[in-house]
Image: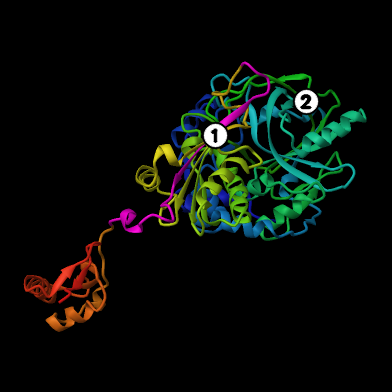
Amino acid sequence: MGQTLEEWLKTLKENDLLHVVNHEVSIHQVAKIVSDNYAKATLIQKIEGYDMRLAANTASNRKMIALALNVDEDQVVQELDRRCERRVPPVVVDDAPCKQVVKTGDEVDLTEFPLHLQHELDAAPYITASVAVARDPHLGVYNLGIYRLMLRTHNETGVDVTAPHKLRAYYRNALEMGKPLQVAVVVGLPTIDLLGAEMSAPFDVDEYEVLGGIRGEPVELVRCETMDLLVPANAEIVLECEMPPIGWSRDEGPYGEFTGTYGALKMNPVLRVKAITHRSNPIFLSATHGGRKPGWTDLHLLFPIIELDLYRSLRQAGIDVRGVRLHPGGCGMWAIASIRQRAVGDSKTALALLLTSSRQAFPKYAVVVDDDINIYDDEDVIWAMTFRSQPSEDAVILKDLKAIPLDPSLSTEREHVSTSKMGFDATVPLEAAKERFERCMPVERPPSSFKAEASDEEVLEMLEKPRYFGEMALNYSGHAYRQFLKVLGRLRETGVVARDNLGRYVRAVK
């Protein structure tokens, strides 16, 4: 059946990535509890007035994404790249735990779920970790996507489909025919499934096969009760819905967005819930956005997907790319890439691609560094930006590019806006003297390689070619090291050993 949310929470706990609240709390405390523990996922066992547990922030940092993929943090993009190439067909099962409770008709009541207000000015509580499942009416393939649902009544929500996703295309097609679109909303999946649901695929590809490839095993599916759709059997909760053919005609929002600011009130379609099925003791999953630490939220689900877009774009252009990272401090709008330069122009080409090749219009800022810089160490990156670049030559600004409309710094005077973007080339120029940029690192030598003693002959033999002090000195330890210092000093004093213009020790020319 695949991993369940309960099993994923157990894995997070075993890796010290889960904050568990055992005492009863008010629904109005939930948002702050989750925010205060932003570096971990949260599981709240008891909420006043509800018979349901709540989990949140289960994909809120890179450690969690790496854990879901069973790789180290610096291998997330490469692993996702490998898994994206696989297609694993799903299998259909007769029954599943998400069918243990079935409610239809007047029994349908969304207020049974612990829907908490996430941000102070949100229009209403939202169902946020909701994977919408729909099927292409012509091709018959399934689409999966994560959409926010604003509570409107006990059996109706708004659904934000303003972006050009497949669900929007399916709904437009149904709207033209004057028919409702069947949509199943799945709540309570583990992070690996949420990651798979965010992956995009061509219109003729069944995204359950994509999810199977990301999982590495077939997705078990079970039939809905009131509609002809299949849903993941490992779900906690399933809402069986339809999108009536009313178009973009109902108010939705504002809502706290990934930028840490509010989006505007907009007009959207609605979902009418016909049936609810769930486990006998379900966990309600809430996704996080914005807040005090907007980069440490479930926005992290998008990071590896965008990083993969950028990684593939650089590789396609012939850039020897070693890693790509979106920085949480900029909510993913800062990208850092490490490359190994092979030709003049590689670094500037990489910058241009980082700023322009993502389908989601990420990032707004980009930095390119050499592969000796750790892109997961902020101080390392800032050091490279400081001492391997000149602002007048290495800062690149591109204008009139595709924008993310939620960016509050954009102009409000025009309906359709573009954005400027900036890149920083923090690489060592290929033609530069590399010694100027050599990093001064602490010395270290394995004890087993130390020589027993030092002599004039041995030192002069090492100087058959120019040597830095460390290349010679690190061969000795203890008394032999002290002996080496005396030998080298005597050879210098007598003029047998000199130094070249790079500071290396050499045999003196007679």
Q: Nearer the viewer, residue 166 or 354?
A: 354
1 or 2: tag closer to the N-terminus: 2
To which residue does mark 1 refer? 421
Which residue is at a point 47% across and 35% down the rendered structure image?
23
Amino acid type at mark 1: Lys
Highlighted range, magenta: 413-440
Which residue is at 62% across, 25% downward?
125
Between 374 and 145, the residue placed more toward the observer is: 374
**Dot 1 lies on which element?**
strand
Quadrant containing the N terminus is bottom right
Using residue 301 as the reference point, say whether residue 167 is left or right of it: right
181 sits to left or right of 23: right
Q: Nearer the viewer, mark 1 or mark 2?
A: 1
Residue 129 appears at what percent x and percent y? 64, 37
Residue at far bottom of view = 457
User: Would you place residue 340 above or below residue 306 in this image?
Assistant: below
Q: Name the residue under label 2.
A: 269
In the foreground, 224 or 41: 41
- Where does residue 163 sit, x and y in percent of width and height? 71, 32
Residue 109 position, x and y percent, is 73, 28
Q: How many marks?
A: 2
Image check: 37 left or right of 243? left
| Image location of residue 157, percent across then percent down | 73, 26
Q: Does the image show residue 22?
A: no
Image vertical order of residue 357 relative to residue 265, above or below: below
Furthest-right residue in view? Answer: 177
The reply to whether residue 280 is visible in this rendering is: yes
Please, is residue 187 above or below residue 458 in the view?
above
Residue 257: in magenta span: no
- Callout 2: 10 Å neighbours few (<14), some, many (20+)? many
Say whether residue 417 is magenta: yes
